[in-house]
Image (tube, rainbow, N blue to C red):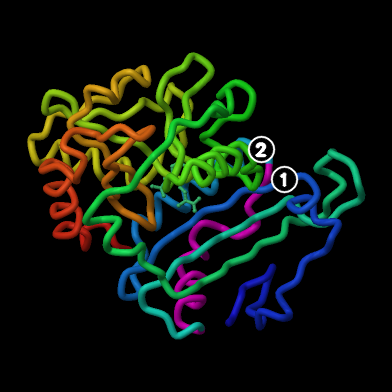
Amino acid sequence: MWIYLNDAFVQRDKAVISVFDHGFLYGDGVYETLRAYSGRIFMLSQHLARLQRSGNLIGLDIPIPEKDWPALLNEAIRRNGLTDAYLRITVSRGEGAIGLDPSLCRRPTVVIMAMPFQPYPSNLFREGVKLTIAHVRRNLATALSPQIKSLNFLNNILAKQEALQAGAFDALMLNSEGQLTECSTSNLFFVRTGRLCTPSVACGILDGITREVVLLLAREQGIPADEGVYEAEALRQAEECFLTNTSMEIMPACQINNLPVGAGRPGSLTTRLQDHFRSNLARFLG
Ligand code: PDD
């Protein structure tokens, strides 16, 4: 497996970084997860823009200019003999002496990993996944903005652990006001009285790229869609619920805290959006 590290492609056993890397020491860095379909990357420029934004928000210069990323990512796919791929870009503050001051690090560490895409088991799409509502709250946007896709992922890991302990696929997080936000690595949608609802960015979420595509497709389909502020209670009246992210696209959720959502199986609006997503996919590939 070829991995891009700093300025060259190296074999996996040579792709090692220093124990003094501030990404390792402090979670000081940013990342993006991308997906390639038959060698073409989904919403590439949006992922690159978000990487840049995350870097800006932590004062980290992404050392590779935006125009150079497509060639590097395509090379990572090609060298590894892949077509359907999962890609991860990681940019950390780099190696430096112990201490929080970013200027201790001379240059950022850049890693690109490209792996065969592992689809989620098809029964999850057919039956829908189970969710739990986490006790841990989503990071306060004014403390550590969820809009920074950072290496500091403990908030989400704590939520995921709760989900696993409860035998659920994932955990939904509330913000400090008790309003719905998102799951550990995905955005939340639900359907109420025929309207598609998703927590707004102001609730403290990562503004997912798949979420954006789903909102666009819904509007094109004439499905009324709202970005709003919702209490957890809103899910009790939900007819349908699904999650979105780059790797799962649209994943139905059929149960929340052991209670069925709607009829307890993927609903018709979810299925319609899944079909529409698939038939329009080519529009969103780079
Ligand atoms: N996760 N919310 C969070 C907290 C996320 O980490 C992600 C992405 C999303 C969905 O974003 P997008 O649609 O742009 O993938 C929402 C990726 C998949 C990850 O962490 O690997």
Give 111 or 155, whichever is nearer the viewer. Answer: 155
Along the viewing direction, whichever of 115 and 173 lies nearer the viewer: 173
Query: Which residue bears the numbered disc 1?
Result: 28
Magenta part of the protein: which range? Answer: 60-79
| Circle 1: residue type | Asp
Residue contact at pointers 2 and 1, CB within 8 angstroms? yes
**Residue at (45, 74) in percent of width and height:** 74
Magenta segment includes 151: no
Query: Relative to residue 95, is residue 77 depicted above or below?
Result: below
Q: Residue furthest top?
A: 177
Q: Is residue 76 magenta?
A: yes
The Cα atoms of the two marked residues, 2 and 1, are separated by 8 Å
Vertical placement of residue 85 versus 202, above or below: below
Residue 86 is situated, as x and y percent measured from the top left of the image, at 45, 67
Q: Amino acid at mark 2?
A: Ile
- Tally the marks: 2
Q: Which mark is residue 133?
A: none
Looking at the picture, how far across and down is residue 284, in whole percent?
A: 27, 57
Q: Quadrant of residue 121?
A: bottom left
Q: Report helix, strand or loop for mark 1.
A: loop
The mark nearer the N terminus, 2 or 1, is 1
Q: Which numbered dot is residue 58? A: 2
**Residue placed farthest to the left in the image?**
222
Q: Position of residue 135 (x, y in %)?
A: 54, 27
Query: What residue is drawn where x is 77% and y is 55%?
Result: 94
Q: Quadrant of the C terminus?
A: bottom left
